[in-house]
């Protein structure tokens, strides 16, 4: 991991007390921890009244004696970026778990565009999951969670942040005016190494920025980029290792050449087939 600004929250390995699931696991799989986390849309570390559609569950740490911070305190924004398979979601969940162990109330959000492992959980590539709410836009979060419940939240985690067009406004409002700690994880660049969504826009707002790296699938060096292996050209193409791979700079450049050559061949073949019809 390569940290641009050392974050104040822990990014070191720790026990998540979260379950491992297979990609085909049913929605009934729960976080298997000693705290008995139930499969709910949100979870918090102190009892608050949420709306009936979005219940919460209380997590208690009997060894913790510090008081949760009030919503009137100063907020924070922490940003976690990197290519695919760099551990962004894992780092986010570790940070969220660390916040719950401090006695802070937490809610998790992800984009409803990501349906790979269902909509009720944030899930890492290796199967660790945490209950969440899937939203089309962040602006709807306060209303759906419930205004009173929102006021009592301390920490908001956002996964797959590149898919939220209103990311900047939401983070600024939550941290500057509502006193929330917002921890954001997302891709900083697309498969063409261009800015992806609004993730880079919130860096000027951030208290800390952490740039993670993966391992190049060709040579094993640090991978800073995401290479798309298919011929699709749209920016938003949700997938896993069947479509993407993390690569170093050398193999990104050479890989793009190979992918582009393959794309030209395929387009040529399609054109030839069309001429015979």
Image: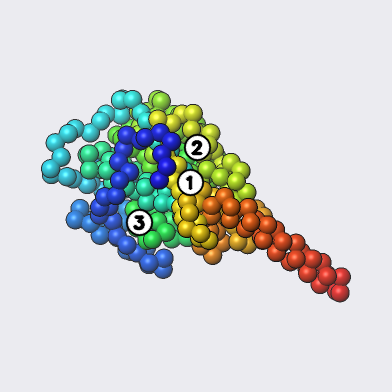
Q: CA distance from mark 1 to mark 2?
A: 17 Å
Q: CA distance from mark 1 to mark 3?
A: 20 Å
Q: CA distance from mark 3 to mark 2?
A: 23 Å
Vertical placement of 187 versus 5: above or below? below
Q: Which mark is residue 82?
A: 1
Local secondary structure at mark 2 = helix
Is residue 112 visible to the viewer in this orientation of the structure?
Answer: no
* Residue nearest the observer in this picture, 219 or 10: 219
Q: Earlier in the sequence, mark 1 or mark 2?
A: 1
Q: Are marks 3 and 2 in contact (CB under 8 Å)?
A: no
- Crowding around mark 3 (Cα neighbors within 10 Å: few <14, some 14 to 19, many 20+) is many
Residue under numbered circle 2: 167
Residue at the image point whose x is 43% and y is 31% from the top: 206
Query: Which quadrant is the N terminus positioned in?
Result: top left
Specify whether 151 is left or right of 113: left
Local secondary structure at mark 1 = loop
Question: In the displayed image of the protein, which residue is found farthest to the bottom?
Answer: 276
Q: Which mark is residue 129?
A: 3
Camera-near label (1 vs 3) is 1
Vertical placement of 130 versus 69: above or below? below
Residue at the image point whose x is 62% and y is 58% from the top: 255
């Amino acid at each position: 991991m390569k940290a641009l600004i050392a974050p104040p929250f822990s990014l070191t390995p720790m026990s998540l007390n979260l379950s491992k699931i297979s990609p085909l696991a049913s929605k009934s799989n729960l976080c298997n921890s000693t705290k008995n986390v139930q499969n709910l849309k949100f979870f918090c570390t102190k009892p608050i009244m949420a709306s009936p559609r979005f219940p919460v569950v209380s997590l208690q740490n009997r060894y913790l004696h510090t008081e949760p911070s009030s919503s009137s305190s100063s907020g924070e924004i922490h940003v976690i970026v990197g290519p695919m398979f760099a551990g962004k979601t894992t780092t986010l969940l570790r940070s969220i778990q660390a916040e719950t162990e401090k006695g802070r109330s937490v809610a998790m959000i992800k984009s409803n565009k990501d349906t790979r492992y269902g909509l009720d959980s944030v899930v890492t590539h290796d199967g660790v999951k945490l209950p969440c709410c899937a939203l089309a836009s962040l602006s709807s979060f306060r209303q759906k969670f419930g205004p009173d419940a929102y006021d009592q939240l301390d920490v908001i985690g956002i996964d797959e942040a590149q898919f939220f067009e209103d990311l900047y406004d939401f983070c600024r409002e939550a941290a500057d005016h509502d006193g929330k700690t917002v921890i954001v994880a997302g891709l900083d660049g697309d498969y063409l190494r261009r800015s992806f969504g609004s993730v880079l826009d919130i860096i000027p707002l951030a208290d800390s920025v952490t740039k993670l790296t993966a391992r190049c699938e060709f040579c094993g060096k640090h991978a800073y980029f995401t290479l798309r292996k298919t011929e699709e050209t749209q920016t938003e193409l949700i997938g896993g290792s069947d479509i993407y791979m993390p690569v170093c700079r050398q193999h990104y450049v050479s890989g793009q050449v190979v992918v582009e050559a393959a794309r030209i061949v395929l387009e040529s073949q399609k054109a030839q087939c069309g001429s015979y019809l």
